[in-house]
Amino acid sequence: MSVDDVLMDAEERMEKATSILKNALAGIRTGRATPGLVDSVRVEAYGSQSPLKQLASIAAPEPTQLVIRPFDTSTIKEIEKAIVASDLGLNPQSDGKIIRINIPQLSTDVRKKMVARIKELAEEAKISIRNIRRDANKAIETAEKDKEISEDDRDRLKEEVQELTKKYEADASELAKGREADVMEE
């Protein structure tokens, strides 16, 4: 693997770690209804597990309500079961064609737990980013030992990897701070 490939690989993997964090944060409940809240709920339908967003359209017509319209109304019971089993604390109500979910206001204790979870997710993303940095630095040192690059190039490349690490750790922190502010907003 060339040195440029090492940098590109590290950046791609760090971007993916940030993207995974962003998706995980979207599923954390705030006081407002958002489709991201139930997007990734897995539903047992047609003999396999599928994300809810593949089986239904999800809308938030009001700040405290979600409306789920299954593409096939025969899956409505399975969707309801999956939402109840998802541990989101939501109570779906169905009229046979659509499912409505009223989003209750969060208590202060629940908000604090959500913030703690956000911090955990952000820290996991940062650890992942640091592990990617370690892998990239190993590849750079190996290239230097194999006489593919000079000591100066090694130092310059390690500096570039460190800059990438700082950038993506800052991105993860910003995503977490933004989500924390959403959760704590009354």
Image: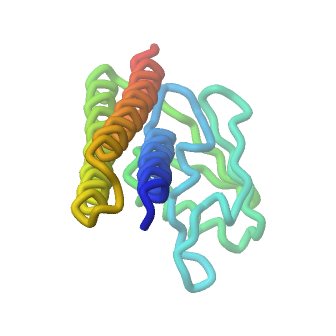
Question: For residue 71, which quarter of the picture?
Answer: bottom right
> Which residue shows up at 24% across the image and 55% down it?
141
> Which residue shows up at 59% across the image and 68% down it?
77
Question: For residue 120, which quarter of the picture?
Answer: top left
Above or below: residue 144 compared with residue 55: above
Q: How is the image coloured?
A: rainbow
**Along the line of sight, the residue nearer the viewer: 16 or 33:** 16
**Along the line of sight, the residue nearer the viewer: 122 or 117:** 122
Is residue 22 in view? yes
The single residue placed furthest to the bottom in the displayed view is: 47
**Along the line of sight, the residue nearer the viewer: 15 or 136:** 136
> Which residue shows up at 24% across the image and 51% down it?
134
In the rendered view, does 128 fall on the left or right side of 71? Answer: left
Location of the N terminus (image quadrant): bottom left
Pinpoint residue 153: horizontal percent, then vertical percent.
35, 44
Pinpoint residue 59: horizontal percent, then vertical percent.
71, 42
In the rendered view, does 161 fall on the left or right side of 96? Answer: left
Above or below: residue 146 compared with residue 125: below
Pinpoint residue 61: horizontal percent, then vertical percent.
73, 33
Is residue 125 in view? no
> Which residue shows up at 71% across the image and 74% down it?
74
Counting labels gives: 0
Pinpoint residue 167: horizontal percent, then vertical percent.
42, 31
Question: For residue 106, which quarter of the picture?
Answer: top left
**Along the line of sight, the residue nearer the viewer: 62 or 144:** 144
In the rendered view, does 148 fall on the left or right side of 29? Answer: left
Location of the C terminus (image quadrant): top left
Above or below: residue 123 compared with residue 96: above
